[in-house]
Amino acid sequence: MNSFRRIEDADFKGKRVLLRVDLNVPMQDGQVADATRIEEVTPTILEIADQGGKVILLSHFGRPKNGPDPKYSLRRVVPEVARIVQRPVAFAEDCIGPTAEAAIAAMKDGDILCLENTRFHPGEEKNDLDFATKLAALGDIFVDDAFSAAHREHAANTSIVTVSGMPAYPGRAMRAELDALAKAFETPQHPVAAIVGGAKISTKLDLLGHLLVKVETLIIGGAMANTFLVALGKKIGKSLVELELVQSARDIMAKAKSLHREIVLPVDVVVAEKLEANVPSRVVGIDQIGDGDMILDIGPRTVEHVVSVLARTKTLVWNGPFGAFEVEPFDNGTTAVAEAVAELTTAGKLVSFAGGGDTVAALNVAGVTLRLSHVSTAGGAFLESLEGKTLPGVKVLRLNGG
Ligand code: 3PG
Ligand code: MG
């Protein structure tokens, strides 16, 4: 970590500290459904505040398309931040301009303020230099604790630094992520397996091709597996699928074959007529899926097979749940695998790294988060790191710019 500044060496007293965090947390019924990302940045928030820095939280939230939208307001997240840091957290209805300036001018040393969603301005995602200059003008020091957003080349985590030249530091959580990734991917113990699942199929299929080069075994779960099953000619009823990606799935399987990599797909699944809590469901083999069936989880034989693969694995990288884990009982498959991963890790037989908002939530449901080697709160940033990409948000924090 020699090439990064260390917050231990910073002097925050009386300074306006722009702290980039990732408050893009899952919500349910207007409430924060999983606060892991808030908990992770709490030590950095308190460290700066306790040194008399004015903590100005900068974050995006969701993917608003047309400017301010109450649905994507960070106002709804602020009470949860205040509850977790156990301090008052003020809120400003805009992240630049007079509203933000007035709120910052009213801060005393040690105060905490959260600015409104940076994505309410189109300049954020466009990485617009004028917008970045306006953001940078609000602070004296930049600290980035949002590893999970570091793969986005957006104003509030890249050009905010480059346009201003202000001193930029990785926060505590960012540093922990970078340290763990270095340990995991520079010299992993082989064999390495990856579990890739979840619903963001189209954003991950490309990545699977790259992962194949790095890992001996690729275990595919979640809705993504359905696309592979279709590629194998299976009937999947009403299950979620991306038909336009079936050819990509075929290409990945062909590549796996030529590289002598193993791809593990479900051999049995839990199906129901619809995704609803405690709806009647049954276990079927992948050749018995009916027209009205929807695949919502992996079945017990698949769990057994995955666990047997993990028993001969030394390093595991996991992103994405196996089933619709947020709806009971479709969390069973993910939970069973998670428990096996935790046991193997605790026994010293497996080094386990997991990442992704949904993955973290699923591991929390399973209650095993603390028993894995490292759990990253990042999704895309975690996987892009695994691909060996340099994340733009990490690059600007390096002292040598590289
Ligand atoms: C995430 O949750 O993946 C990060 O906060 C980045 O959000 P994005 O995928 O909408 O850019
Ligand atoms: Mg994302």
Image (cartoon, grey):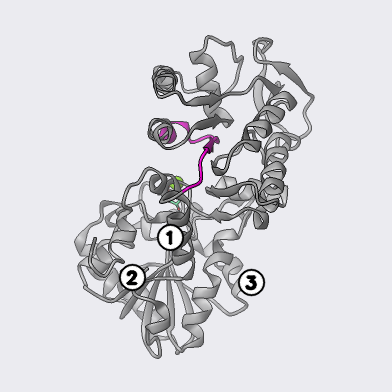
Can you say which quadrant of the picture contains the C terminus? bottom left
Nearest to the eye among marks 2 and 3: give it: 2
- Helix, strand or loop status at disc 3: helix
Can you say which quadrant of the picture contains the N terminus? bottom left
Q: Could one spot residue 111 in this view of the protein?
A: no
Q: In the rendered structure, which disc, 3 or 1, sits on the residue that comes first in sequence?
A: 3
Q: Is residue 197 magenta?
A: yes
Question: Is residue 398 rendered to the left or right of residue 54?
Answer: left
Q: Which residue is mark 2?
A: 4
In percent of width and height, residue 247 lies at: 40, 17
Q: Residue at x 48, y 86 (%)?
A: 110
- Helix, strand or loop status at disc 1: helix
Q: Is residue 134 magenta?
A: no
Kind of residue sitting beneath label 2: Phe
372 versus 398 height, above or below: above
For the residues marked 2 and 3, what is the alpha-carbon distance in whole angstroms? Answer: 31 Å
Query: How many residues crowd around disc 2 within 10 Å: few (fewer than 14), some, or many (20 or more)?
Result: some
The part of the image, by quadrant, that contains residue 83 is bottom right
363 versus 157 height, above or below: above
Q: Residue at x 59, y 80 (%)?
A: 87
For the residues marked 3 and 1, what is the alpha-carbon distance in whole angstroms? Answer: 28 Å
Kind of residue sitting beneath label 3: Arg
Q: In the rendered structure, which disc, 2 or 1, sits on the residue that comes first in sequence?
A: 2
Q: Which residue is mark 3?
A: 83
Q: Residue at x 59, y 68 (%)?
A: 79
In percent of width and height, residue 162 lies at: 22, 66
Magenta segment boundaries in residue numbering: 188-204
Query: How many residues crowd around disc 1 within 10 Å: few (fewer than 14), some, or many (20 or more)?
Result: some
Question: Is residue 285 rendered to the left or right of residue 211?
Answer: right
Q: Which residue is mark 1?
A: 178
Kind of residue sitting beneath label 1: Leu
